[in-house]
Image (cartoon, rainbow, N blue to C red):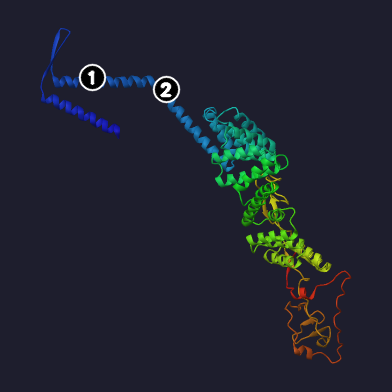
Amino acid sequence: MIRILIFLAVVFALGLGFAWLADRPGEMLITFGGYQYQISLMVAAVAIVTVVAAVMILWWLVKSLWNSPYTISRYFRVRRRDRGYQALSTGMIAAGAGDGALARKKTKEAAKLISSDQEPLINLLDAQASLLEGDHEGAREKFERMLDDPEMRLLGLRGLYLEAERLGDRNAARHYAGRAAAVAPQLAWAAESTLEELTERGDWDGALKLVETQKSTRQIERDAANRRRAVLLTAKAQALVDSDPNAARTAALEANKLAPDFAPAAVIAADMVFRQNDVRKGSKILETAWKAEPHPDVAELYTHARPGDAVLDRLNRAKKLQDLKKNHAESSMVVARAALDAQDFATARREAEAAIRMDRREGAYLLLADIEEAETGDQGKVRQLLSKAVRAPRDPAWVADGVVSERWAPVSPATGRLDAFTWRAPMERLGQLIDSHEDRPAAAIPAPAQLAKESVVDADNHSVSADRPDEPASSAGGDPVRPVTAAGFAAVSADAEPVGPAEELTRLPDDPGVAPEDEAEKSPRRFRLF
């Protein structure tokens, strides 16, 4: 558009110039070679413009002829490069789609048209084609050659890292990730692998520095960075408890400040504070963590904050925790344990039963069995409660990647992942709920006068077992049995032999049976097959 405007401006200026000359006639006298030439001013101006235009055209022709070899070669070079990039693009798409044959074909075609030094993506396509063909050794050699090129070094390290992960060589994978993280700390995959290596060997300070770098480069959000720092500081405090208590205390308090609801950080921080006889500060730390999420480790340390306390004092502290988090199974369990230690069996039983109503689980039944044994010594009821505990859901524990641990750990022992342990109930035992004939209420045994013989036939010829009235029977056609009616009893012959009452099952010597109050409360239930 600008060129058009400039052209129109030039034409307009020339027109104005010629119009100005036409309005002012004049003559021009030129003496050349002994001759005098007299022409008008307008003709002279036209001649000058014509000569200038002719010279420009002649210069353009000479220049075009002079540069024609370069222009022709440049045309073919650009055409060749376009074909090469088209082959490279098709090859990358084929590699992404998993078409190894097409990727290899386009790799060779692109390598013929474009130099690999000019376009490094050809090396990547070549390595990807080798991987698709199953030539992992050749792919690793190509990735290793990329390490010599500064532009391709990170790509080569990434490829070698993935190959090491595929082979299960964790040390080699972390070596390549460490080299990549040293060159480009913003790479998330390199930073994560390096972080796993640092935490595995217990270099908590190095891991903290790496997390701070991740936070500064915005690889992770602020909340995630604070969580990771809390986990690492907790692990550092646990490692320094015996060797450097002051450093452990500082790290634990900082971890608790970053994540007040993180139970392991609260426990180690409160423990270090208790060691310095600051019970009030430690209790506040544990109370804050308990409000966020009740945890048995928090309760255990809170109730035993002062070693010289009597059992009643510990019971009062447990009740204080219960007031902070009411209507929670863990709160009731804490009070029940403390009441058992104080031999307040009524309170212990009441709270244990409340815990079972809120969260039916294994530990609550075991605690109730301990209370029963300590209070009454009734081994029958104790075994009954232990049987219920076996069938009840398991208590929460620290679980990470299928590993169940009683104690928290900063990394997973299976994968090395940081902050993998979570407090939850482990996977349920194998098996589905099935009907339990033992849990069904016993059917009432009919009186002898109601039975005339072992089987009777009603009007529809459906038989019912007289000594097993609760067992269904089927006719030949598969129809359900109809109830026995008065007509059926009337059809019994007069000389029918009466049947005596069913014999009661003899109890084993060590089987105390079920108490009447428990039998009254019995209802149909289900149990787990494990």
Which residue is under mark 1?
A: 51
Tag 1: amino acid? Val
Element under disc 2: helix
- Picture layout, residue 192 above or below residue 435: above
The structure residue drawn at horizontal position 45% and vertical position 29%, both measured from the top left corner, is: 78
- Picture layout, residue 166 above or below residue 324: above
* Number of residue marks: 2
Q: Of marks 1 and 2, which one's residue comes earlier in the chain?
A: 1
Element under disc 1: helix
Q: In this view, does 160 lie to the left or right of 505?
A: left
Measured as percent of width and height from the top left, residue 220 is found at 56, 43
Tag 2: amino acid? Tyr
- Picture layout, residue 153 above or below residue 40: below
Seen from the viewer's position, the closer of residues 227 and 304 is: 304
- Residue at mark 1 to residue at mark 2: CA–CA distance: 30 Å
- Picture layout, residue 439 above or below residue 160: below
Cβ atoms at labels 1 and 2 below 8 Å apart: no
Question: Quarter of the image holding residue 447?
Answer: bottom right
Measured as percent of width and height from the top left, residue 515 is found at 80, 74
- Which numbered marker is on residue 491? none
Q: In this view, does 7 lie to the left or right of 99?
A: left
**Residue 135 appears in the picture as rendered:** no
Measured as percent of width and height from the top left, residue 442 is found at 78, 76
Q: Is residue 489 left or right of residue 354?
A: right
Question: Quarter of the image holding residue 384?
Answer: bottom right
- Which numbered marker is on residue 70? 2
Task: State the residue lying farthest toward the bottom.
Answer: 494
